[in-house]
Amino acid sequence: MDDCEKLAGLLFSDLTVSPDELEQKYPPRNLPDGARVSRFAPSPTGFMHMGNIFSAFISKLNADITGGVFYLRIEDTDKKREVENGIESILDGLFAFGIVPDEGVVGQNEEKGGYGPYRQSHRKEIYRCFAKELVKKGFAYPCFCTEDDLAGMRKAQDDESTTTKGYFGKWAVCRSLTFDEQRSRILSGAPFVLRLRSDGDENKKITVRDLIKGKIEMPENIQDIVLLKSDGIPTYHFAHAVDDHLMRTTHVVRGDEWIASLPVHIQLFSLLGFKPPKYVHISPIMKIDNGNKRKLSKRKDPELAVSFYREQGYPTESVLEYLMTLANSNFEDWRRANPAEPLSRFPFSINKMSPSGAVFDIAKMNDISKNIISKMGADEIFEKVSVWAREFDPELYMLLSDNPKYAKSIFSIDRGGTNPRKDISKWSDVRGYVEYFYPALYKSGKRPPESITAADARAILSKYLEVYGADDEKDVWFSKIKGLCEPLGFTPNVKEFKKNPSAFKGHVGDVSAVIRMAVTSRANTPDLHAVMALLGEREVKARINGAIDDYTLGQHCAMSG
Ligand code: GLU
């Protein structure tokens, strides 16, 4: 038995499983040709942001589009950074956007699939098994350096101004310990980490063909990186190689901050005898700020937080539709050609993703969402707003649930035709959209339209009260408004007005604008006839009388001022 084998035996004497057994336990997946296996592998550190959601979304699409598997692995090897309910918030974040894993961690204490466990903290024996293999082959060794030793090494490297820093080559002092030295330190109980014995050459390069970034060339890794920490827990690098191999991942979709680690990863796959996966490195989501492109920031951009979308009440489908525009720039053309198709029919392609980072634009997201909401029926809107308002706007929730029929009638106005209104981009817009329908929410704030004097507005409203009929059908209602025009110096005919504007005080549009303002305090509303019918006679008359009073008062003030 050579020293490496003796060392492996000494370090892992209690190990009961072999790499062969693991290879058999987790065989290559039985999937059709071309089916991709990709994963989302977050750490439960608490802050799920849109960058994570975007990565998970892309990873899922990558699997779905090929009839493959998308799974969730929890990378909980850093206990210091872990937060309580970390897994729950990851799952909540994913589920909120309809990103449901086919396999892996699917609940706080629930897993699905034959390639688990899917929480790294439950895979200690698996990592030890492969660590033992590396020790046996001479590619790993115990390092007994203390924090002080490492600080001393860093200082010496600074003093010598070495171009490369770190634990490598001659600096890697524990590399050259003899087996007897190793054994006596281990038996004396000295703490140690397990390090890679790097076989890299910094003058040689690794080449990776990233599916988004293209060809990546980087110098080989020469650092003796840590594989297992002193408590036997693996580092990210080692766990990545072991897990993505045994879980038979074909595509590693992750943030591009991991590109720097590629030389280590490629080396580990090679030393472990594993076939490396394909890499898909996603650029961070960017934002244009004062003409400059920058990363979305946790501090400055509320839209980075997953919670923002829930609190604001964006429908899931709006966010996903928007994320798809960020993912593939040809999506919008496809959508125009296929307005009614579900999102899942879009032929997503990883190769069409931007290597430089998609730019997030909340205004565009709002437009997309308005469009999606404009196609929803009144009942659907009622249900969705109610679910949202119950949590985030209890007052609105009470009003809606007090009289669902009334609420649904509000949402029905101008809905369902070929050109539905696009007023609502998120459920938090609904309060503003409906408030004038509810005396409890209504804030009166009327002023006559700019081109109309207070006296003319008053005259229009007084005359209108004389003819107003609460039960009038729309054509009767409109002909009454037209009928007000001429006696008051307006014209019912917009064309005529345009031909000779100085001959009139305004046209029928101005007259109805005065009525609209008096009844709703808005310059813009859905179909006014429908609005007034819903408000009912008493409310309409009270508001018109209120406006007449307000405008009278306004004129007094103007005259005395
Ligand atoms: N646990 C790593 C992270 O949260 C995952 C990187 C990867 O997907 O491989 O950043």
Image (cartoon, rainbow, N blue to C red):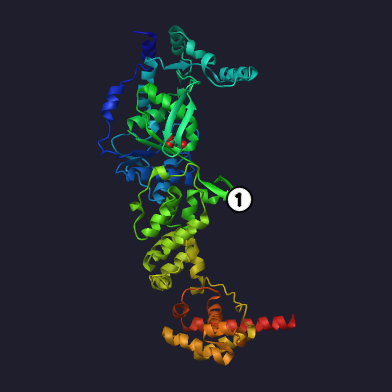
Q: Is residue 71 left or right of residue 444?
A: left
Q: Nearer the viewer, residue 508 or 80?
A: 508
Q: Is residue 43 visible?
A: no
Q: Is residue 16 left or right of residue 538?
A: left
Q: Position of residue 190 (x, y in %)?
A: 48, 15
Q: Position of residue 225 (x, y in %)?
A: 48, 23
Q: Residue at x 56, y 19 (%)?
A: 150
Say which quarter of the image contains residue 66. top left
Q: Nearer the viewer, residue 402 or 81?
A: 81
Q: Position of residue 547 (x, y in %)?
A: 59, 81
Q: Residue at x 46, y 62 (%)?
A: 370
Number of residues whose C-alpha sits closer than 10 Å to that of mark 1, classed few (under 14), some (14–19) or many (20 or more): few
Residue at the extreme front of the image, as rendered: 499
Image: 131 above or below 353? above
Q: Secondary structure at mark 1?
A: loop
User: Amino acid type of disc 1?
Assistant: Gly
Q: Residue at x 61, y 88 (%)?
A: 503
Image quarter for ligand 1? top left
Image: 336 above or below 437? above
Residue at the extreme right of the image, as rendered: 561
Say which quarter of the image contains residue 241. top left
Q: Is residue 265 visible?
A: yes
Q: Nearer the viewer, residue 370 or 206?
A: 206
> Mark 1 sits on what residue?
291
Q: Is residue 550 left or right of residue 379?
A: right
Say which quarter of the image contains residue 74. top left
Image: 304 above or below 24? below
